[in-house]
Amino acid sequence: AAGRRRPRRELGHGLQGWATSWWRCRTQRLAASGRMDGEKIPGDVEIDDEDFSLEGASEEVSLGAELESMMSELRDFEASRSGAAEMGSDNQDNFDGDLEGAVDVRHIERSGTVCVLGVPNSGKSSLVNALVGAKVSIVSPKPQTTRHRVMGLALLAPRPKSPPTTQAVFVDTAGIMQTGDAGAEFTKSFRHKTKRLFHQTRLHKAMVKTAWKSTRAADVLFWVLDASKCFAYGDYMPECAELDGIAVGPTLRDAWWMHPELEEEMAFLKKLRKLKRKVNVVLNKIDLLRVMEVDVEEFTLQMRERLDADLGSDESGEGLLQNLWPTSVLNEPETLVPLQTWLCEELPQQSPIYPVENISDVPARVAASEITREKLFDVLRGAVPYQITVINSVWREEEDGTLLLGQKVVVVSEGQKKIVRGWLRNITEDAEREISEVVNYGRPVQLHFQIAVEPKWQDNQEYYQDVQGLLDHTGSLVFPQ
């Protein structure tokens, strides 16, 4: 009948929607070919039967037969699709455990920031790498390897072989050392040789400042302690002087930490005491205690009592020591399970802070230069590794995906320049391979080096300003452009 309008249908709403969409496309084709009168009908307006003028009964019969055939096919397709959906819903639980690597964001109930602090070479970067499950921080046997603040993103499960429920954002900081002259009278005669290789430069002060600044926004503080070092040098002096078994003089606070080798640990303890923040201690390298035939459980109890007493309490009277976990990050990864379980229970209940598929916020350019510096750290000796830095001067990607990377290695003397030039030939292949895997998605990398001598580079802000948290996220592994 004239004036009767057919209601509008949207795509994907049952068979009528499919049929109407097909009919609309058909009428548009007819209009374009000149077999229909009137204007072409846009897809988002109502269709008026008045505008149609089909020519001939044969065309009308043809259209009706074609429409009926199409409707029949659509019914069969929808029936098969609904059957597959029912089968999928019945077996959904069976497939959940078989999808390896798939992360259901709906299971992520908690997320938070964990600041990992400690003195150099205590195992902070190794701990972060182990918890993340990938290498996000460079590591070496030498102290003070980490210079930049590195963020590692980990998905943690409350139990082994269970789906992850927590996103933990681990902030790996540089090893904190004394920036003043405290304890300098002991330095030459007592302290280990590697400790005397560090100089008080602006670079070092910026690293320490950045490490402590990272604690402000953290939900949890981890203090990584070297268990073997505490056993070897702890309890150096009595708390009170005695004469014939009788205490004379005042009680000396923090006497247990008085050995010069524990100077950084004692300064760290005092700083944490001022912060009045809950502290979780990761007592690392307990495997070395077993080598020394030390009762690990007994020593752990002693350290718990010592730290509980020396850290003190907050304003409400609660102890600042929250947990102490004996671990061996490199040799006994199962010792990290209690730590992971606690994080899954205590981090704030909120949605993931970062995308769950990412593992780090380190910019690709920084990662490339840090990999080269790590390789140099492994082979250089003495003061040389602590007085070099690596900067990317050229970063060019070819059409075939090859990354042409020009890096400038900065040293402080001509003698160091000769030493570094000799070792660069040996580490180039390993550095290219790791940069290819970490930064260039497995595609080829060609490294070219320039060695520059700048005696005062450690006091030049251009070289250490990124350490203070001013890293550009361009090309970041977490924020790809």
Image: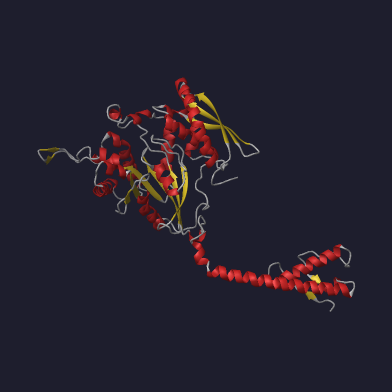
Left/right of residue 427 with respect to residue 237 in the rendered view: right
Check the image and tell me how it is coloured: secondary structure
Residue lying farthest to the left in this orientation:
244
Please tell me in which quadrant of the rendered image residue 166 appears.
bottom left
All told, the count of numbered labels is 0
Looking at the image, residue 46 lies above or below residue 450:
below
Left/right of residue 373 with respect to residue 479 in the rendered view: left
Where residue 376 appears, as percent x and y from the top left, is 46, 31
**Quadrant of the rendering where the N terminus is positioned:** bottom right
Asked whether 250 or 406 is in front, the reply is 406
Question: Is residue 233 at least partly visible in the picture?
Answer: no
Question: Is residue 439 at least partly visible in the picture?
Answer: yes
Looking at the image, residue 411 lies above or below residue 18:
above
Asked whether 295 or 201 is in front, the reply is 295
Looking at the image, residue 451 lies above or below residue 114:
above
Q: Residue at x 48, y 31 (%)?
A: 427
Residue lying farthest to the bottom in this orientation:
1
Where residue 313 appears, as percent x and y from the top left, is 30, 50
Where residue 188 appears, as percent x and y from the top left, is 30, 26
Where residue 349 appears, as percent x and y from the top left, is 45, 59
Please tell me in which quadrant of the rendered image residue 87 appears.
bottom right
**Quadrant of the rendering where the C terminus is positioned:** top right
Left/right of residue 302 with respect to residue 371 in the rendered view: left
